Image: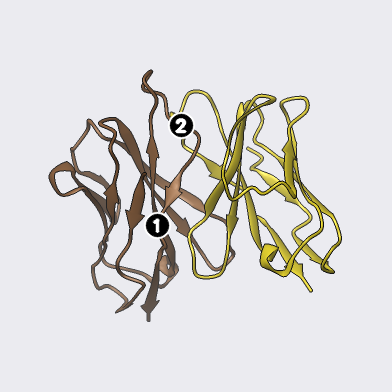
Chain colours: A yellow, B brown
């Protein structure tokens, strides 16, 4: 089975620039999640989709963050006007409808904002 | 609000020792799910186990075992005869469920326990 894939794996950007990350879930997984993990911390929930519908957004997701899953397959997470505090690992996970929310994670995209 | 606490920030053991990782959670729901994930140095979170709040049976999988005690809101994880390959960060997580009994999407993670197994 192909796992969850994320691109790019690393992104270095300058403060104020926009960045976009992509996540491809495992085939047939209808739910897709985004988390953010900073050094020494557990992942923090950002948002999740069931098919193409965005069902929940965390208060961590400021208006500079937007996520989409237009056709219920891959998803993108965009950060506008990046700040140094956005530097983190962005994790994507997916789950199928039959495993009661067991989430399978991708390798993550590490963002560094200079 | 739900919360997960992993009080042990770091644990260091010598190979073949048994080690227990503690997890305490808070939730107002009566139906919820608990998880353990492993994050090796490569960085990718690996699912280990899911437990339903109604099922308090302990579970064993090879060298891994889990002790779920609803009365103390704990879900502890024991590795028997630890090996160097067990070195990783281990996370406990909680997911509350909706009225239909299917989970919400959000996992709430603890801060993780760094386990180092020395040869």
B114, above or below B52, in the image: below
The percent position of residue B61, horizontal first and vertical second, equals: 30, 47
Label annotation for residue B104: 2
Q: Quadrant of the N terminus of chain B?
A: top left
- Which residue is more in the foreground, B80 or B56? B56
Q: Tell me where residue B118 appears, x and y as whole percent.
A: 37, 81
Residue located farthest toward the top when viewing the structure as drawn: B100
Res. A107 in view: no
- Looking at the image, which is closer to me, A61 or B106? A61
Q: Is residue A23 left or right of residue A103?
A: right
Mark 2: few, some, or many residues within 10 Å (few <14, many ≥20)? Answer: some
Disc 1 element: loop
Residue A83: x and y in percent read: 75, 65
Q: Specify the label residue B102 is tagged with.
A: none
Residue at the image position 60 percent from the left and 36 percent from the top? A48
User: Which label belongs to residue B110?
Assistant: 1
User: Chain ID for label 1?
Assistant: B
Above or below residue B88? Residue A58 is above
Q: Residue B93 at what x, y percent from top left? A: 39, 49
Q: CA distance from mark 1 to mark 2?
A: 17 Å
């Amino acid at each position: 089975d192909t796992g969850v894939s994320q691109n790019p794996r690393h992104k270095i950007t300058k403060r104020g620039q926009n960045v976009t990350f992509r996540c491809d879930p495992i085939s047939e997984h209808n739910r897709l999640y985004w988390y953010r993990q900073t050094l020494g911390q557990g992942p923090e929930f950002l948002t999740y989709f069931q098919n193409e519908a965005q069902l929940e957004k965390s208060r961590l997701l400021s208006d500079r963050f937007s996520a989409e899953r237009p056709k219920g397959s891959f998803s993108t997470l965009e950060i506008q006007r990046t700040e140094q505090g956005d530097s983190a690992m962005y994790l994507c996970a997916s789950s199928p409808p039959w495993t009661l929310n067991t989430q399978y994670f991708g390798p993550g995209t590490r963002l560094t904002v200079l | 609000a739900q919360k997960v606490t992993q009080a042990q920030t770091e644990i260091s053991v010598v190979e073949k020792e048994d080690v227990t990782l503690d997890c305490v959670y808070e939730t107002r729901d009566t139906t919820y799910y608990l998880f353990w994930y492993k994050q090796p140095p490569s960085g990718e979170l690996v699912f280990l186990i899911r437990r339903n709040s109604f099922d308090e049976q302990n579970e064993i999988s090879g060298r891994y075992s889990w002790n779920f005690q609803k009365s103390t809101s704990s879900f502890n994880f024991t590795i028997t005869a630890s090996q160097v390959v067990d070195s990783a960060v281990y996370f406990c997580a909680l997911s509350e469920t909706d009225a239909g009994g299917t989970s919400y999407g959000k996992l709430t993670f603890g801060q993780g326990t760094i386990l180092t197994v020395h040869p």
